Amino acid sequence: MPRLFLRAPRGVAVAAAIAIGAAQMAVPVPARAQEKDPAQALPIIRDAEIEQLLRDYSQPILRAAGLAQRNIRVVIINDRGFNAFVVDAKRIFINAGALMEAESPNQIIGVMAHETGHIAGGHLLKLRAELANMQTASILAMLLGIGAVAATAASRGTAVGGNPMAAIVGPQTAIMRSLIAYQRQQEEQADRAGVHFLTLSGQSAKGMYDTFKRFADQQLFASQYVDPYLQSHPMPVERLAALAEVARANPYWDKKDPPDLQQRHDLTRAKLFGYLDRPDTLTRRYPLSDTGLPARYARAVSNYRHADLRTAIAQIDGLIQSQPNNPYFYELKGQALVDSGRGNEALAPLRHAIAIAPDPTLIRVLLGQALISTNDPSLVEEAIANLRAALQADAEIPDAYDHLAIAYGHKGALADADLASAQAAFNRGNMPTARQLASRAKTRFPIGSPGWVKADDIASFKPPQPRRLFQ
C-alpha cells in the first residue's frame, strides 16, 4: 500500500538547479528563487510494488546508458499531473499522474529514457556552468547599460529622454533568450539519447513518441500565441518532428510490451487509483461489471482506504487466490489489518510477503510496525531486526526510524530511541527537532561510542549554503 509522506531529500545540488523535465516548461524561475533544494518537502509516495516495477522499467535503460552502477533511484511524487524530471544525477522523479495516465509500460519507459538522456548527457552540470556564464554576461550587460545611460546624460548635460532602461533590459533579455535556447537544445539531445537507449535495450520508441505527441496535441493551440524563444523546451511541432525522425527509425517500433509486464503496469495503476480516487470516481473508472484483476485490486484498495475492512479483506483474499505468489496482495492484507488495529493477524501475511518479494525493504518496515502494535514484549527484538534491516537497505525511510524509536522505547533503550527519533526528524528535514533529540541522545550515550558519534553528526549538522548566481 502506498505510504505518503513529506521528505526533504539530502544531497541535491542547490545551486540554481533548474529541474529538467519531460513536460513543457515556461520561462525558468530566476536563480534566487531556486536557492533551496528543488526536491525539498515534495510529497513522496513509497510503495514496494510500484518501486519494484519502476526499477524493472529503468534498469535496461540505465544499462544501455552505462549508468547501471550509479544506483540511480526512481522517486514517485504524489502529483496527478503527467510529468517527470531530474534535479541531480542520482534520481529520476516521476509523478504518480504519469503512471496513472500511461496506458502501457513502454510509455513510462520512454519518459525514463528521456530523463536518462539528461543524466547521461551531464545536462544539469552543463546548465549550471551556462548559468554561471550568464551571470558574468548579465553583470557586464547591466554595467554597460548603466554606463551608456550615464554617458548619454553627460554628453547632453540634461536628463536622458526616451526609455533609458532599454539600454539595460535589452541585453538582459537577449541573455535570457540565449539561456532558454540552450535548454531547448538539451531537450532535443535528451530525446535523441532516449531513443538510442531504447534501441540498445531492444525496446520500442513508440511509447516515447506517443507521450510527446500528446504533449504536442495539448499545447498546439496555446503555442500559437507563445514566443518560441521564451520556451525552455522545443516548441511541440518542431520537437515532435525531430523526435519522429529518430523514433520511427527504431527497429523495435512495433514491439509490444510483454503481457506479464502489462498486467503489472495495470495493477500499479489500479492501486494508485484506488488509493487516490474517491469511491464514486473509482466506480466510474472501474464499474462493478469489470471483473478483471486490476479492477478488483482497485476496489479492494479503495474499500480498505475508506474503512470497509470486512469487504476489503474478502476482496484481498480473492486476489490472493487468483495470484498466490503475488507478494503485494499479502502486503495489502497486512497493511489493512495493521491500520485497523489487528496487528496480530497481520503478521502471517506480512512474513509471507517478505519471503517472496524481490525487495522486501518497505514490507519489513510494515512488519516492524505490526510487531510493535501487538504490545508483545517477546516480539520487540524481531521488530528491531526487521526495521534495522530495512534501514540498512534504505537509510531514508522516516517511518522506519519512528517505529524503531518506539521499539527501543519498549526495551527501555532511551538513548537509541532518541537517536532514532532524531534520524526520523532529520530525514524529514525538520532540523530543529532533529538537533534537539540528537543533543539529548548524546547525553545518554557514552562519549565517543557509535551512537554518540551519530547523534553528534546530527546535532552539529549544518546544511551547505547555496551559491547565489545572481546577487
Image: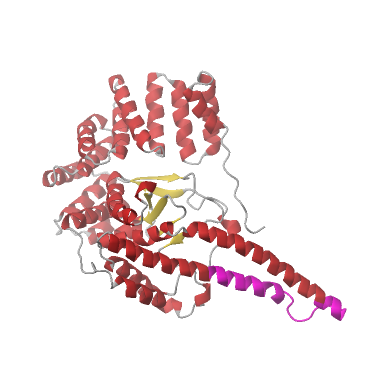
| 72 to 230, vertically: above or below | above
Instruction: Judge from the rendering whether residue 442 lies leftward or rightward of residue 351; answer left or right.
Output: right
Quarter holding the C terminus is bottom right
Quarter holding the N terminus is top left
Magenta-colored stretch includes residue 27? no
Name which residue lies at 49% across and 37% down: 426
Q: Nearer the viewer, residue 447 or 411?
A: 447
Instruction: Judge from the rendering whether residue 22 lies leftward or rightward of residue 449; answer left or right.
Output: left
Magenta-colored stretch includes residue 161? yes
Q: Tell me if residue 30 can be seen.
A: no
Question: What is the tally of numbered marks visible in this picture?
Answer: 0
Q: Position of residue 59 (x, y in %)?
A: 30, 52
| 175 to 403, vertically: above or below | below
Instruction: Judge from the rendering whether residue 98 lies leftward or rightward of residue 176; answer left or right.
Output: left
Prevailing SS of the magenta stretch: helix
Name which residue lies at 60% across and 60% down: 132
Colour setup of the view: secondary structure
| 97 to 220, vertically: above or below | above
Q: Position of residue 179 (x, y in %)?
A: 55, 68
Q: Quadrant of residue 206?
A: bottom left
Q: Tell me if residue 266 can be seen.
A: yes
Name which residue lies at 40% across and 74% down: 239
Q: Position of residue 438 (x, y in %)?
A: 52, 29
Name which residue lies at 29% across and 66% down: 205
Instruction: Judge from the rendering whether residue 381 lies leftward or rightward of residue 396; answer left or right.
Output: left
Q: Position of residue 413 (x, y in %)?
A: 42, 20
Residue pushed farthest right? 157
| 68 to 448, vertically: above or below | below
**Start-end of magenta stretch:** 152-180
